[in-house]
Amino acid sequence: MARRRVDVLVVAIFFLSLLWATPARAEIPSLLTPGVLTWGGDQEGGGPYVYPADDDPRRVVGFEVELADELAARLGLRARFLQGQWDRMPDLLRARKCDIVLNGYEWMPARLDVMEATIPYYVFGLQLLARDTGEITSWGDLERPFAQGRRRIGVLAASAAEKYLQSRPSLAIEIVSYDGSTDAMREVETGKLDATLQDTPAATFYRSRFPRLRAVGAPVGHGYYVVYAQEGQKALVRRLNEALLAMIDEGRIEAIYRAYGIWNDAQRELGDIARSGRFYGYSKEWHDRPAVTKRGVRDGPPERRVEITARKRGFEVVRAYGGVLLQSAGLTLVLSCLSFPLAVLAGLFIAMGRLYGPAWLRAPLAVYVEFLRGTPVMLQLFFIFFFLPEVGINVPAFWTAILGLSVNYSAYESEIYRAGLSAVPKGQMEAALALGMSRPLALRRIIVPQAVRIVVPPVVNDFIALFKDTSVCSVVTLVELTKRFSVLSQSTQATTELMAMTAVLYLVMSYPLSLVSRRLELGAGKAPS
Amino acid sequence: MIEVQGLCKRFGAVDVLSELSLSVDKGKVAAIIGPSGGGKSTFLRCINGLESFERGHVRVGDDVLVSSDSARQRAERLRAIRRKVGFVFQQFNLFPHLDVIGNIVEAPLRVLGHERASAVGEAVRLLERVGLADKKSALPHELSGGQQQRVAIARALAMRPEVLLLDEPTSALDPVMAAEVMSVITELASAGQTMIVVTHQLALVRAIADTVHVFAGGRRVEYGPTAAVFESPAHDITRAFLHKLQAW
């Protein structure tokens, strides 16, 4: 009888919540792509958050992937992952490149000035990990002065762990920042670091990969992962909060976390904090909403278990990741081959403008060249991708890369061309003019062809440099070869094999260019100096 | 045919050319001689606009280049004048990226819009005329200096210039190569090509020039029929200059 009453209650609440949710659905705010929830994360951060799938490294898996998929589904949307650089996530949001950030981002009051936050989806702590040889067995060991100076502790750059360590001046340590969590773990194993402080999910998930690491003491600190949305997207946050709360109440969160082995008692707090209104962005009605009876989760072992497989080695790595590396090399190739001709062409016109153009054009061109040569290409990409949207110009990532690289390199190419054009003897222009040619015709037929021969070697040299410079495009969410290497190396620890493959791919792409350059150089060498 | 009147050019406070006048009739050859730095080359370069001038004018046929022309007028007039006036440089200035034929046909093709076949045919005839029929597809750096200068002359002739200006055409050459080039120029003169030649080669002047003009310090100190100037120079500078050259 009692059981039946519960069922009725559940059904009633289910329908009530449907009624309650329906009007809200209509107020789903403007998404980047209608019907799609674009969420930002960085696979380089590694497991268990977002990482390349074992069977298909092009696909991402992780507890946050499952979370995003289910949240989107509950909002009647499809989830789409956007790869970005972890410390740039707030910029991605501000530039409206994604709808939400869901990637181990801690709830911090300072962030609320620029973003909207949901209720927490995970309660994390910070776990100190050290070698199992027993030099460090407690936090107290870190306070004691150490014969070889300060202990070196690795952390994820800009993470909660970094801030935690910075807030404890009594520790006799040196903080070393990394872009991925497993790099730091490996360096502890190899002895370059003395210990690493990791968010509990990463520490738990990678335990099997780093058998020589030992947890030191209990987790410290206490923080909440939340989903961030663009400033002002209150309606979206509200819908996400509803969905999160429902997932917590229905045990879906627990099921996912158990699968990744990251469920613990601290998570029991999740529903309570939400309801007690301890979080920014809660309205009173959350407080009044009754908890839905838990369903679907039983005590005991989880229905499924996501675990990291054993580390692949040797040719296994080549087989498993060769394809995806090759694909990323393809992007590197496309980026270089599209942006470089543009750079060369623009550079040629800039050089001609500076040498032969009207006086009013020369100063601005000089400023253009000096400005672009004097600032890093990374900053320029950043400007195009993250700043231009604020003034209403939204350039997609791929074209940002093409534009940024070609504009940056056009400055270098123009200087090479300027030198090349100046190196053509003055008598050549005079001879052409004396034959009745116009200046433009003389430039096109007589001067530029000679300058081109002079500049071939330095220009090809720049092309090879550009190949490798494409790696900065990862700041604008493109996964080219170097970024793919970093991502795979973080999640697989097959660093040596991946590094060798990546190096070979770069070589295979750039060496033919060197050969072409050498041939052209020999050909140009025939001409008199 | 060609007439320069009152040409003045200043460079800062220095008068490079002052009140220079010179005219050449159709089919005649004028030679400009004089000590180095006397403004000979500058004068020649003013005629086809490679140098600007402050006063005076240059008339070639019906086209007049005046110092007061605006930039646009000047460009227009220069184009017209340059089509009528060929120029041979001391340093040849062949286009190193084009072969011999390419050097010769470039302007006829691109400036006059001639058909390639006829331009190439004309180029071959010109090469025969300067004695280089076998060098059609050589690149400039494969030729000797004398051969390069002869190609340069053929290149200038390909535009069928009414007047040919030669700026010390043999000064960069050794005596043997200079002789090759001089014989080509002599042949042109006897064929009735109107020319103004700046040179130190008195033998060449004697052989081809109808009039001689002696420039010194940016002025024309003396001029007249070749024989008259050579036999009885009126000016001290001419006498000293001729004496110095002949003493060699």
Image (cartoon, coloured by chain):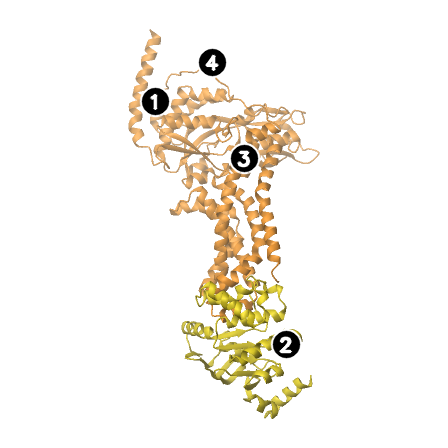
Which color has been applied to chain A in this rendered view? orange
B100 or A84, which lies in front? B100
Label 3 vs label 2, nearer the camera:
2
The chain letter under disc 4 is A
The chain letter under disc 2 is B
Same chain under badges 1 and 4? The reply is: yes
Q: Which residue is mark 3?
A: A325
Same chain under badges 2 and 4? The reply is: no
Q: Which residue is mark 1?
A: A289
A61 or A6, which lies in front? A61
**Residue at image point 62% right, 23% down:** A211
The x and y percentages for residue B47 are 49, 78
Circles 3 and 1, Cβ within 8 Å, touching? The answer is no
Circles 1 and 4, Cβ within 8 Å, touching? The answer is no
Mark toward the start of the polypeptide (3 vs 1): 1
Q: Which residue is mark 2?
A: B179
Q: Which residue is mark 4?
A: A299
Distance between mark 1 and mark 2 Cα atoms: 110 Å
The x and y percentages for residue B155 are 53, 70
Q: Above or below — where is B191 with respect to A392?
A: below
A519 or A37, which lies in front? A519
Same chain under badges 1 and 2? The reply is: no
Distance between mark 2 and mark 4 Cα atoms: 110 Å
**Badge 1: few (under 14), some or many (20 or more) residues near its Cα, within 10 Å?**
few
Three-letter amino acid code at the position of disc 3: Leu
Mark toward the start of the polypeptide (1 vs 4): 1
Which color has been applied to chain B in this rendered view? yellow
Same chain under badges 3 and 2? The reply is: no
Label 1 vs label 2, nearer the camera:
2
